[in-house]
Image (cartoon, rainbow, N blue to C red):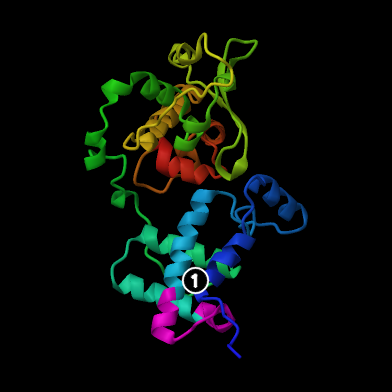
Amino acid sequence: MSKPHRKSIVREVIERLDSKMAIGESRYQAKVERRSAGQREWTQSTGKIHSFKTRSVYQEHAIRFAKWAREEHHITNLEQLDPRANELASSYLQKHIAEGKSAYTLQAERAALRMFFGDRSLAGDVSLPRRSMANITRSRGAAKHDREFNAANWQPLVKFEQATGLRRQELRDLKVRDVFVDHSGQAWVHVESGKGGRLREVPVLPGRDADVLSVVRDRQPDEHVFERIPKHMDVHSYRREYAQALYLHYAPGRELPPPGVRLRPQDYDKVAAERVTWALGHSRIDVVLRHYIR
């Protein structure tokens, strides 16, 4: 009699990640419920994966880790791997630190493994290098792919993005009916499903209403506002422009917070920064201050 077929460790990794998927469920609401149940840390993970992009990144890291454990430690299934998760994850990260992997890759690897094993303290004894603004080259210089995008050929799209600061997938999914003007004359963009499945209303940058409304004028409500978003369009840089302009609008008389230093409360307008954070679809003001406003 033939032996029953046993799943590979890669298949087990994929199936465990499948069980953690929560597409369409609000990450924000899940955190509210966990907090109301007595779990006081707001930044705590929900233990679920709320976007396909996050799933793709986490799966890549988890499978690479599982293959390493199989090759280096002869572990062939999760039953063997789970009890050694902390030990092996620590060893894995230490190896990558020694190889000089970037702080961003290391942070992503640990986040993926913590989600995969359901342990927020996994590899907590490993001191990862700190992420530094000085090491970010994306959207702060002329990258090669930026030269492959000619903004002059995409002016309606570029101006729309500068006026709204939407994410790439939010631009892609946007319908004509999602752009509206309220009773006071303020133009808004309704995002039905942003990061984590959250909806929000995004204020159009004051003075830029025409750049937004002209794109949707006399069109059918169910049409997509844009048929295509160029792959090489630097969406992050336009979001940053929007964030800085909106912050200065909400904080008249102030300058942008100083870069490269630890911010003190008096260095920025908290209310203005919170409003920009919401407009961008983020939940953490410190992230927006660090990567968008300054």
Q: Residue pushed farthest front?
A: 1
Q: Which residue is mark 1?
A: 10
Q: Is residue 70 above or below residue 107?
A: below
Q: Is residue 107 left or right of residue 277?
A: left
Q: Residue at x 54, y 72 (%)?
A: 122
Q: Is residue 236 left or right of residue 12?
A: left
Q: Residue pushed farthest bottom?
A: 1
Q: Residue at x 27, y 32 (%)?
A: 149
Q: Compare residues 229 and 209 and report the one nearer the observer.
A: 229
Q: Is residue 73 left or right of residue 187?
A: left
277 drawn magenta: no
- On the image, the x and y values in percent for residue 224 come to 51, 24
Neighbor class of circle 1 (other Cα within 10 Å; few <14, some 14-19, many 20+) is: many
Q: Is residue 242 above or below residue 180?
A: below
What is the quadrant of residue 107 in the picture?
Answer: bottom left
Q: Residue pushed farthest right?
A: 37
78 drawn magenta: yes
Q: Compare residues 194 and 220 and report the one nearer the observer.
A: 220
Residue stretch in magenta: 67-86
- On the image, the x and y values in percent for residue 283 come to 57, 43
Is residue 143 visible from the viewing direction of this image? no
